[in-house]
Image (cartoon, rainbow, N blue to C red):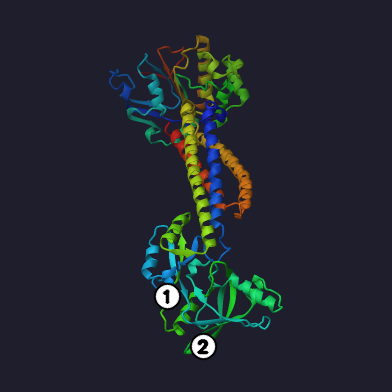
Amino acid sequence: MLRTLLFQNQDKKQLVIAIIGAFLGITFLVTSIHYLIRVNEFGKGAEILGPNTIIVQKRVNNSAVLGLSKTDFTLTEIEKIKAEPFIQDVKPVISNNFDVSFETNDPLVPRFRSDVFIQTVDPDFIDVKSDKWTWKEGDTLVPIIMPRDFLVMLNTFMSASGIPQVSDDVAKDINFRFTISNDNGKEWIDAKIIGFTNEVASILVPEKFMEYGNEKYALKTDQKITQIMISGKESEFGLVEELIETRGLESKNSQMVVGRLKSIVGTLILVILGVSVIAVLVAGLVLIQYLQLLMTRNDYEVRTLLRIGYHPTIIIKQFFLYFMKIFGIVASLGLGMFFLFKLFLDKLLEEGGLMIDTSISFYAIGALILAYAIFALTSYRTAKNGIYKEY
Amino acid sequence: MTTENDRMNITLNNIMPTPLASIQHSDKSIWGNFISLEPGEKIMLNASSGKGKSTFTLTTVGMRKDYSGTITYDGQDIQQFSPDDWTKIRQEKISVVFQDLQLFPKLTVKENLLLKNALTDTYSEMELIQFLEQLEIDNKWNQLGGLLSMGQQQRVAIIRALCQPFNWLIMDEPFSHLDVVNTQKCLDLIDKRATELGAGFVLTSLGDDHNFKYSRELNL
């Protein structure tokens, strides 16, 4: 009866317009947040380097070959790159300044030995669990991350030797051994593969191991930084690419392609997200304005109800629940439309080669809940202010 | 049934509504004087048009605050009451028949009465119909309030005001559109209910005492 009384003076046209606006806004908001998250996650975990991270070196030109220009980075150059607003972090890739050879040390695998080049990068750039990626002086086993090309080479060697080839997991069980040395001494340390990478051409070792070797078995030549790792900010990869070009640097093409793709898609989705947020806000405002209009139209009814003994909270509850129901329907319809969009978009992205995670993003649902909560709070406060002003 | 302890005293101490401040009031006027409305009193407030009968009604029940002076219920200044206090008072202590009746025109007579009755569950639907029968408008039970004549609306508003326990019933010219017979029936119903509850009432009038023996007569 109370509901009949309070909601009989409605102009449903404005309500329908607000509902359609809120529905579209919610749909695009949830969809854009979901895909923004999923696209940014794309490639994460598949490689050891964190997202938006590339390794660059100076382009080797004729003058470098003739020794007229340098191919190593000075600390000043690193600091300058780091100061760019679109750069999150820059760290040098440290190489060995001592002799290293690497060999199999397992009775089940034929002997294979080679002089190698090892490198280390800041642990913040590496997407592996830190408890595995650690070494200290006295440890007898060094964890290593291998270039995937090495496994291909090892399998070619195994095949030629008439031995079955090894998978990633089997390779991680093979015992290897480093020999580190200089003219004054030599040391053997066991090693185990903990992961593979397509992005680095050398064997990666923990920082402490590199420091240990460089300190104890340092050669007489100065150590040079020839590669650096650059981590760009989300959706600003275009600027990172521009920097690489203007500074005469180069990187592996695959790293650039993924970064560029993510940056373009991310930027597009950010634009859609921005428009969606504005749409939700405008639609929310129209709904709140509608609530105010409804209360103004029911000014007499509200005042009379208070005068005959109705408590303000009973009347507030009527308006609040009514609008919660409306926004609940809008949110449900928006969520339903998001699922339909998702079916279509996931297929479209899959066909385009972008194999993103298809599970529902928690953040998208969180955004929907947040929008609902903000609307609930605003409509409650609007209803409360409107009713209590009658006192 | 209201007990002696529940009965409420109302005082108006030097009350002067802002819109009436510039008018000269007589020594007998309640405006600017001290008036105490004692529990159970049946009072007629007599005044000509424009002297503030509706202002008295709305001010005394806390619906207007544009006045100087102090109004108290059992010694408590009504300006200090919270919305919770007013809700309780309007449900259980003071009932009002407004001059403009304040029915809901788009609700039926039944809905108008049940909406009020639901707050305290004072009467059954059957009892409400019996009240309407007594006032000869039981055939209007399902008719929209806005379609009733003013006299019929006044009778519905009176019955609505009776749908709660009260210590005081404040009525602002409640019989202005009623004939003598219907006025008498309404007044009998009101008097019976007030007596039953041990409650008092204030009836504002343009001078007609409706042949009722009041405890006291006040003037504006």
User: If the image is split into quadrants, where does the C terminus of chain A sit?
Assistant: top left
Residue A4 sits above or below residue A382 on the image? above
Label 2 vs label 1: CA separation?
Answer: 23 Å
Q: Is circle 2 on the same chain as circle 1?
A: yes
> Residue A96, percent across and down?
48, 78
User: If the image is split into quadrants, where does the N terminus of chain A sit?
Assistant: top right
Q: Which residue is mark 2?
A: A186
Q: Which residue is mark 1?
A: A224
Q: Residues within 10 Å of mark 1 (few under 14, many from 20)?
A: some
Q: Residues within 10 Å of mark 2 (few under 14, many from 20)?
A: few
Name the chain under label 2: A
> Residue A180, percent across and down?
52, 84
- Dot placed on the residue nearer the N-terminal end, 2 or 1: 2
| Badge number at residue B190 | none
In the rendered image, is residue B83 in sight? yes
Residue A353 lies in what quarter of the image? bottom right
